Amino acid sequence: MARAAASVAAALLVVLGVAASVATAQMETCSGDLPPVLAANYSGLACQPVWNNFVLRYHQDKDNVLRVVLSTMYSTGWVGMGFSRDGLMVGSSAMVGWIGKKGLPHVRQFALRGKSSSKVVVDRGFLVSNDHDHTVVVQQAKIYLAFQLRFSYRLTHQHIVMAFGNSIPVKNRLTRHQDKTSFTFDFTTGTYGRASVDGSFPYGLRRAHGALNVFAWGVLLPIGAILARYFRRMDPLWFYLHVGVQLAGFIIGLAGVVAGVALYNKIQADIPAHRGLGVFVLFLGILQVLAFFLRPSADSKYRKYWNWYHHWAGRLALFFAAVNIVLGIHVGGADSSWKIGYGFSLAVLLVAVAALEFMLWTRWSKNSTATPTY
C-alpha cells in the first residue's frame, strides 16, 4: 500500500509540474524571443497577450505602417486576425496564415463579406500591404503570423477580430472557425477590452436600411402598381390612390437609401452587387417620379410611348427591388424573421396579383371596352 501511495504521489507531482510549467509558459508568453527568421523585420515590438494563448506583438511607425506578429499554439489549420470598422465580422478584412499540406507557409488577405464560407473571399479587402512583407513560421509547436500593413491614419482604438480553424485551407478556401473573438485594442497604450457598444450604431442603421426598403420597395410600391392595373374602373380614385401610395413609397424608400449610404460610410461593406442594384432601382424610381411631371395629355400622340416607358420602368424597378431585397437579407446575415416576413409579404402579393389578373382577363373577355389610360 505504501509503495502504491508513493507511486500515486509521484504521478501527481509530475502532473502538477507539467500543469505549472504550461501555466507559466502561458503567463510568460511575451518573454520568449521571436524565431530568428523574424528578428530582422519584427524586432522591438510591443507585446500583449490578448485571448486564450494568443499573443499580439505590434509596432506602428511614423508613416502609419503597422508591423504585427500574432502567435499562438499550433498543430494544424489556420489562424487569422481581422480589422473591423464596427466590431462586426461581416465587412471586416483579415490576414490569415497557415502551413499547407506540403509544409509551405501561406499568408493571404480575406474579405469577410458574410458568415458562410463562400462569402470569405481571398485576395480581397481594404487592408493595404505588400505580399513580400508577410510570413508564417512554426517553431516549437507555435505559429507566428507576421505581416505589415499601411494605414492612412494612426491607429488608436481599433476593432479586432480573431479566429482559428483546425483544418488546412484547400485552394485558399477557409473552413469554418473553431473559435473566435472580437475586442477593441488601443495600439497607443496596449490596452484592450470587449467590443465597444458603438457597434449598436451600425446594427441600428442596418435594421433601418432593411426595414425602410422592405416596406417601401417590397410592400407599398407593389400595392401602388396593383391599384393602377386592376382598379381603373374606380376612376379617378384609382389614380389619386396610385400617385399617393407611390409617392409615399418612394419617399420611404429614399430614406432607406440614405440609411444605406450612412451604413456604407460606417462599415465600408464590400457588397458591390447589392449596392449596384440599389443604385439602379433608385434610378428607375427617379424616372418614375419624373414621369408624373412629364405625363402628356390622354389624346397626345406621345401618350402611347409614355405609357410604355412608365409601365416597363415600373415593372423593372419592382422586379430588381425584390431581387435586391432578397440579396440584402442574405448578405446582411439577417435572422429567419426577416426571411419569413418578406417571404410571406411577397407570397401574399403574388397570390393577389394572380387572382386579380385572372379576374381582369375574365372581365376583358366579356367586355372588350378599352380601359382608361393614365
Image: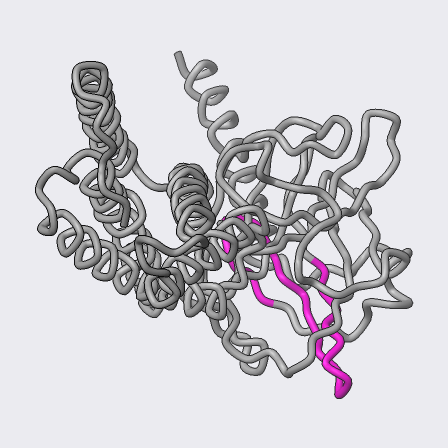
Q: Residue at x 58, y 45 (%)?
A: 21
The residues colored magenta run 48-69
- In this rendering, does residue 33 appear at all? yes
Report x, y in % for residue 27.
54, 57
Q: Residue at x 74, y 52 (%)?
A: 145
Magenta-drawn stretch contains 229: no
Residue 293 against residue 28 in the figure, above or below: below
156 relative position to 73: left or right: left
Q: Residue 83 is drawn in which quadrant?
A: bottom right
The foreground one among 42 and 158 is 158
Q: Residue 193 is drawn in which quadrant?
A: bottom left
212 relative position to 18: left or right: left
343 relative position to 47: left or right: left
374 relative position to 333: left or right: left
Report x, y in % for residue 347.
24, 25
- In this rendering, does residue 351 appear at all? no
Residue 67 against residue 350 in the figure, above or below: below
Magenta-drawn stretch contains 53: yes
Q: Residue at x 59, y 51 (%)?
A: 272
Report x, y in % for residue 87.
44, 60
